[in-house]
Image (cartoon, rainbow, N blue to C red):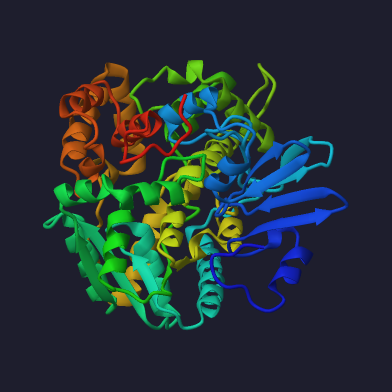
């Protein structure tokens, strides 16, 4: 058994007795019985496993370097790499190494003595048939779930220092409020960014209002770039890429400085604000009567835009297959021409489920490996079992956007501090959901949306408040501009550099 915090006495047997859907916290379990090896992964894929067949032996590890030493061959999976270039992750069970596979989120993988294997999902992502429609009732359910999850995490942390990455947004603010409500001790909040960025100022204001300790790590893009180009950058890539996703670099330099300058306890536990809320995208699909193919296409396109190519999904069969697999695991119809049941609910389930299974599980949640790389623990109270159950009880009106959640967070923050504080958010996010959808649809229809968003994105990417441009440095500046003008994102530049083996001092990924 693996857990991000030291397991208690009897934890293994307790975990084994529970059905996967009832288990709490982050965990990965390996069981062997009469030659059959079973790998069970939690719903967030917080610590996935890699496996391959070497002769008549199964090789299983959480370390790509171990697989490299034991795999019969160490060559790139070109089909998976093409998805990686456009998505930042490899779909399904595929990895960037040929015939090396990875456990998916919320799954059981069985490895058999004869060399065959199978993977199935144990998670069922379904909204309640009779959902809660009252905002007040839903708030009560949500509060209760947060109470249970946070209290359990505090017991598991057992007095160790708690670090909360406090951005200017909703999620970390809500978590900080709940830690305060439960009397958590030795809580330190922090943020990082280019000096003078608005997010740093907002983060400090939230910490002061909640009377929590706070510090910031200043980011100098030139210094970040120099450090990334050296051995520290290569070491971080090797420790965190997991053979399936781009290393999540956002926290890297701040963590490096915390460790070097002894800013926090060596056994500190990080509680990031990752949450079950907000996995919906393309909400306009809920307004009309989209066809089955339109929905499937929208999902595939959404996850393959890193290079700015809106038609990339057409030549990514592995990604399309993962989307169809997701449809088979929720209430979305799988047969062409079949009507969409339940209005927009089946659409919402599909969009959220594929997002949770693929991008969230493989790229966003891989940010936890950054804490592990520096020897710290972590926990995810806002992604724990009770939070999933609570969220899936809400109606479409309460869950399809972040509007209810934003109001809820504002209310509990006001209860805790007696004040209302500014949020760090894009200007478009300040427009109410209905008008925002109509505006986005109009801009899309006229072609204006793409041009406007691209211009704003380029300016932000080249002078990012969190110094993301530092990680672009290995690519010539003129090429950066050209790629961004074509619609590539910062992450898209990084996937290209990573696959080329030029993102750091040494290549990490198997080469062609």
Q: Residue furthest left?
A: 196
* Viewer-nearest residue: 461 or 282: 461
Which of the pair 501/404 is nearer the observer? 501
Identify the residue at horizontal 33%, vertical 69% (top origin): 413
Q: Residue at x 42, y 54 (%)?
A: 404
Residue appearing at x 63%, y 42% in the figure: 70
| Number of numbered discs visible in the structure rendering | 0
Locate residue 87: give its quadrant. top left
Quadrant for the N terminus, please. Answer: bottom right
Name the residue at 75% across, 59% down.
19
Residue 243 lies, in percent from the top left, at 51, 40
Left or right: residue 457 versus residue 132 is left
Q: Position of residue 151 (x, y in %)?
A: 53, 76
The residue lying furthest to the right in this view is 34
Counting from the top left corner in percent of width and height, residue 350 is at 58, 36
Specify whether residue 466 is in view. no
Vertical arrangement, residue 64 with respect to residue 422, above or below? above
Find residue 306 and report its image quarter. top left
Q: Position of residue 401 (x, y in %)?
A: 43, 45
Q: Say if 127 sits above or below 266 in the image.
A: above
Asked whether the viewer can see residue 13, the reply is yes
Q: Quadrant of residue 176?
A: bottom left
């Amino acid at each position: 058994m693996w857990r991000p915090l030291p397991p208690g006495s009897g934890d293994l047997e307790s975990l084994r007795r529970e059905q996967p859907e009832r288990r709490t916290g982050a965990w990965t379990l390996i069981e062997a019985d009469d030659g059959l090896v079973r790998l069970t992964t939690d719903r967030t894929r917080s610590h996935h496993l890699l496996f391959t067949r070497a002769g008549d032996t199964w090789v299983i590890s959480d370390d790509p370097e171990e697989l490299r030493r034991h795999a019969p061959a160490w060559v790139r999976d070109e089909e998976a790499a093409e998805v990686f270039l456009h998505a930042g992750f490899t779909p399904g069970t595929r990895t960037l190494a040929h015939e090396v596979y990875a456990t998916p989120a919320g799954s059981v993988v069985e490895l058999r003595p004869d060399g065959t294997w199978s993977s199935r999902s144990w998670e069922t992502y379904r909204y309640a048939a009779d959902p809660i429609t009252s905002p007040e009732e839903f708030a009560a359910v949500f509060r209760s779930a947060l109470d249970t999850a946070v209290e359990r995490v505090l017991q598991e942390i057992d007095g160790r220092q708690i670090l909360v990455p406090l951005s200017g947004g909703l999620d970390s603010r809500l978590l900080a409020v709940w830690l305060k409500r439960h009397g958590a001790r030795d809580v330190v909040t922090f943020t990082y960014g280019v000096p003078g960025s608005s997010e740093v100022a907002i983060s400090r204001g939230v910490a002061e209002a909640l009377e929590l300790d706070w510090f910031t790590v200043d980011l100098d893009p030139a210094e970040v770039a120099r450090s990334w180009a050296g051995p520290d950058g290569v070491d971080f890539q090797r420790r965190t890429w997991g053979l399936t996703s781009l290393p999540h670099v956002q926290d890297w330099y701040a963590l490096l400085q915390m460790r070097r300058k002894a800013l926090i306890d060596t056994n500190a536990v990080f509680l990031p604000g990752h949450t079950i809320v907000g996995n919906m995208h393309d909400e306009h699909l809920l307004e009309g009567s989209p066809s089955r193919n339109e929905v499937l296409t929208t999902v595939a396109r959404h996850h393959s835009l890193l290079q700015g190519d809106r038609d990339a999904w057409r030549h990514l069969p592995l990604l399309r297959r993962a989307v169809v697999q997701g449809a088979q695991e929720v209430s979305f119809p799988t047969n062409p021409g079949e009507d969409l049941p339940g209005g927009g609910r089946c659409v919402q389930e599909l969009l959220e489920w594929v997002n949770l299974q693929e991008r969230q599980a493989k790229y966003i949640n891989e940010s936890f490996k950054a804490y592990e790389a520096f020897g710290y623990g972590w926990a995810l109270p806002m992604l724990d079992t009770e939070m999933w159950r609570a969220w899936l009880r809400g109606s479409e009106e309460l869950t399809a956007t972040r509007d209810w959640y934003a109001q809820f967070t504002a209310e509990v923050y006001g209860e805790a501090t007696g004040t209302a504080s500014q949020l760090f958010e894009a200007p478009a996010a300040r427009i109410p959901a209905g008008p925002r959808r109509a505006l986005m649809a109009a801009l899309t229809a006229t072609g204006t949306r793409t041009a406007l968003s691209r211009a704003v994105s380029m300016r932000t990417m080249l002078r990012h408040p969190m110094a993301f441009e530092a990680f672009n440095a290995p690519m010539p500046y003129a090429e950066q501009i050209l790629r961004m003008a074509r619609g590539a994102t910062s992450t898209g530049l990084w996937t290209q550099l990573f696959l080329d083996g030029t993102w750091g001092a040494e290549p990490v990924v198997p080469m062609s």
